[in-house]
Amino acid sequence: MAIINLKINSKDYSIDVDPQMPLLWAIRDFVGLKGTKYGCGIAQCGACTVHLNGQPVRSCSLPVAAVANKNITTIEGLSDDNSHPIQKAWIEEQVPQCGYCQSGQIMAAAALLSKNASPNDADIDAAMQGHICRCGTYPRIKRAIKKASENKP
Amino acid sequence: MDIDTISRRKFLKLSGLTGVALTLGYYLPANAKEPKLITAFDAENRGIELNSWIYIDVLGKVTLYSHRAEMGQGVYQSIPQIIAEELHVDLDKVNIVFAPGDNVKYGNQITGGSSSIRGSYKNLLNLSATARVMLIKAASNKWNVSELECYAEDGHVIHKPSGKKLHYGELVLEASKLDIPKNVVLKKTSEYKLIRKPLQRQDTPLKTNGTAVFGIDKMIPGMLYAMVERNPRLRGKVKSFDATEALKIPGVKQVFIVRMGVFNTFREGVAVVADSVWAAMKGKKALKVDWDDTGFEHLNTEDIYRRMEEALQKDEGLSFVSKGDSNAIIKSAEKKIDVVYTTPYQSHSCMEPLNCIAHYQKDKIEIWGPIQAPEWVQDYISKELGIAREKVIVNMTFLGGGFGRKAFMDYPHEATMISKEINAPVQVIWSREDDATQGPYRPGISYRCQGVVANSEISAFKVSIAGQNNSHWRGGAKDIPNRSATEGFLKPYVDNIQNLSIVDIPFETPIPTMWWRSVYASTNGFAYESFMDELAAESAKDPITFRRTYLKDERSSELLDKLEEVSGWKNRTKGYGVAITECFGSTVGQIVKVSKNAENKIQIDQVWAVIDCGWYVNPDIIKAQVEGSIVMALGAATIHEITFKDGKTVQNNFNTYKMPRITDIPPIEVYIMENDADAGGVGEPGLPPFAPALTNAIFDLTGKRIRKLPFELAKV
Ligand code: FES
Ligand code: FES
């Protein structure tokens, strides 16, 4: 066990945990933010995606010790009021069905948009193909990302 | 935000029931089939328990006490839309409170069979319209005017001549004492303002900011976590285990054998209880278990399908449909088609792995989790643990997918057994590997299809089915044919094909099986509609024209017209395939268009889907469900399957049980037929026609028949 300092959504947390514990479980069970989901544990589905210094990463496959003191953003930190352009587009296009994969999808889409203000189909495919949605919301995900890029000021 | 679930008693207390609110509900009179409407006032005087009800409080807020779990199909949205329409209130004035599992009071609570709206919409419309009429009556009494001069709008009753206006909340007390009016007239479809409009789902914002509480997110004070090492051989047992290393891991508290029910059988595992999920995971890894695999060592996919094939050739089974004399015609025909279609076992693989919280407290058990069938859980646990069923309280959370898997009692039972052993609340989380390798699965099924075409028409049609019957796991009789043998096959086909024979050949394996989205239609549809296409090709008729011979009824013909229209069928080039199936009260037709890409590989260019689900609420939710069904069908047809080797499931996570990705999805257009027929399901019927429409399109392009799923598009 070790004391690890985490910076999540601009807040500091200090937790006493196994340094090898994946960031996912630190966020969920020790910081108490449950929006980031467990889907596969082996970097295959994207449900656990958070931003590390603005980059989308798989929190299920990242030891918590490796991200100490770095800037982490989770779905809860994307906006206070569902106002991020991606969240707005997700609501407009009615993307979620069961919703379980959507935190990860949204974090990946938000990271894409911050790098590329108007992604084309190939850009969207490349950024999103690591994300599984068992409910099959892919057509709407595509539409929503395009909408968000148009809506962006 | 949580889905609210509160007990009935607490609700009645909170609501004051008769005091300051209008409460209208349904109850089932003794020996009656149809529920009856009653006011809470009346119910209390007569000592009747209400089944489900709406409640309008002094602030004009409307609450529906509902009994359906939300698992992605949009019930959360559709029910308020129905109530708001007939009650003339804003959508955001309507709340739903979910009832904990209790089938005595609420009737069938299973979220499955696409029944959420189907089973309840007429009652809901009537309930809401009746409340509105009573509120109008209350206002006219107060003003001493004729109710004909009054109307309801936006949660108010208005007296037209004088412009006087009262808020619903100001009328509930008066209204609650009135008799229930008879023959309340419901709106016509053309008068709807909310129903049939693509309104946004109310739960969407909770699912875009991470605040929707799924089962896995739920927390109870003092809760511990458990993971279970499970025998990789289906239904095997534990011989012995060594927990020395596991118990050294900080946070691991207890390790013991846990037994959980799989229908009428059991399976065993070793539970690791810890103070965090991660510690439980590590503890599970550190365990050494010696398994008792007796009876399951030699289970292999190849053997299973070889046995099916043998059974099909022997062709001795239970007759399900027998019309005319297909056997004799087939026997004496000079030319006949005799082919076998094969479909694989599949895992539900909901994105949210199975999980459940249980708190065993001697005289009471409380459960929280993503649960599709709360009343079954209640029944099962009450029976297994010998505790009165009203002492088993089942609370539902949001479900991260269900597809049939979460209508099963094994995981709540397991959580309960662990809680009982440790005497504390516990959340059991299944790893993705547990979820993928343990089943129950959709059964793999093989179909022998025999047919004869004469004068461009079907002169004999026979399908023999060899595959596991899900109902046998629940103790269903083995000497009667599978009731679902024609699920997916349109009723007009059954009615209009003269010489038709459907035979169910009993087939068993030790593999646990369970409903999977659209159940038997998901595999039947492939066999029936592919075979129909083979017969059409044999007849040299256009595949839609050929089907029209048997689908002459108005709804089927209109659906076929629409399919032709939206896909440009009549002016099509090569590479188009059609299929049409029916299940859960809805019919869906699909046309798939394929072509060869630059590398000479098959690619799917477009899917058109037309659904006839009768009366419906929200077109956007229906479209989303059909899109999702097509994606799921595409995975099951071209990407993944569950196979068994030496008694173990081969695929154990998304690297081996691969899923469709955003890159695999063609453009999909969904159309809805407009009519007022009884509401059919929308969550499942979009799935079955996809696979046969795709393989029929591949046949149209290449002349190659695909009779075994899954197949790789790139390898056709
Ligand atoms: S849970 Fe991390 S990628 Fe699936
Ligand atoms: S919305 Fe259910 S898994 Fe994506």
Image (spheres, coloured by chain):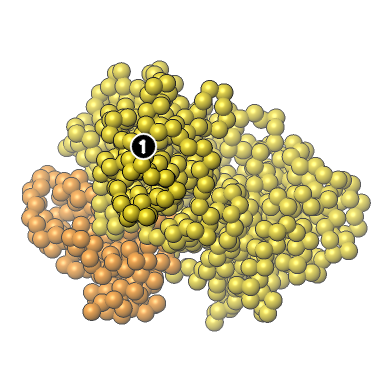
The residue type indicated by label 1 comes to Ala
Q: Residue at x 7, y 50 (%)?
A: A14
Depth check: give the residue in front, B319 or B713: B319
Residue B450, given in percent of the width and then of the height, sits at 79, 52
Q: Say above or below: B619 vs B330.
A: below
Q: Where does label 1 land, which residue?
A: B175
Q: Which shade of the palette goes to chain B?
A: yellow
Label 1 crowd bin: few (<14), some (14–19), many (20+), radius 10 Å: many
Q: Is residue B619 above or below residue B352?
A: below
Indicate left or right for B568 with A48 as reference. Answer: right
Question: Between B487 and B694, which is closer to the camera in this rendering?
Answer: B487
Rendered shade, chain A:
orange
Q: Position of residue B188 (x, y in %)?
A: 53, 55
Is B220 left, or right, of B681 in this rendering? left
User: Percent x, y for residue A4?
Assistant: 9, 51
Chain ID, mark 1: B
Left or right of residue B464, residue A97 in this image:
left
Q: Image quarter for residue B197? A: bottom left
**Residue A68 in picture, x, y percent from top left:** 11, 57
- Placement of B513 over or under B674, stated as above or below: above
